[in-house]
Amino acid sequence: MKATAQEVITYTNEKLNDWYKKAKEYGVNGVAIAFLHNNQIVIDYSENGVNGRFSLDHYEDEAMDYVFNVWSEEADLQVDKVF
């Protein structure tokens, strides 16, 4: 059974919360939230006061952890930084 966008978002938000809980051990104070916007899954995140926005167009028919895995490997505050 294929996961709905909302199921992917809920799962991704749980993973993001866990990620930033663990990141505190390494001096990273951060938060993030995933949501659906214009058929993209968007992740707004903040690390040590710097805000970023990461978006992913292609997430359908992928594994449940695809969005989180792509974000954790490709998100870059230097690129994603919003002012």
Image (spheres, grey):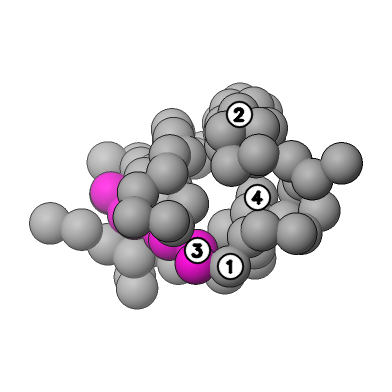
Q: Which of marks 4 and 2 is in front?
A: 2
* Magenta-drawn segment: 50-57
Residue 21 rendering spot, x and y as whole percentages: 61, 26
Quick one: 24 or 9, which is closer to the camera? 9
Lower position in the chain sequence, tag 4 or tag 2: 2
Residue at the far left: name it.
83
Toward which corner of the image does residue 15 lie, by quadrant? top right
Please state which amino acid type lies under the numbered disc 1: His
Image marks 1 and 4: residues in contact by CB distance under 8 Å:
no
Q: Name the residue under label 2.
A: 10
Prevalent SS, magenta region: strand
Image marks 1 and 3: residues in contact by CB distance under 8 Å:
yes
Lower position in the chain sequence, tag 3 or tag 4: 3
Q: Which of marks 1 and 3 is in front?
A: 1
**Location of residue 21 with respect to 35 vertically, above or below:** above
Please state which amino acid type lies under the numbered disc 3: Leu
Quick one: 60 or 50, which is closer to the camera? 60
Residue at the far front: name it.
1
Q: Mark 3 points at which residue?
A: 56
Q: Is residue 29 magenta?
A: no
| Residue in view at x 49 percent, y 67 percent | 57
Q: Mark 4 points at which residue?
A: 68
Which labelled disc corresponds to residue 58?
A: 1
Bin the neighbour count of mark 4 within 10 Å (Cα to Cα): few under 14, some 14-19, many 20 and up: many
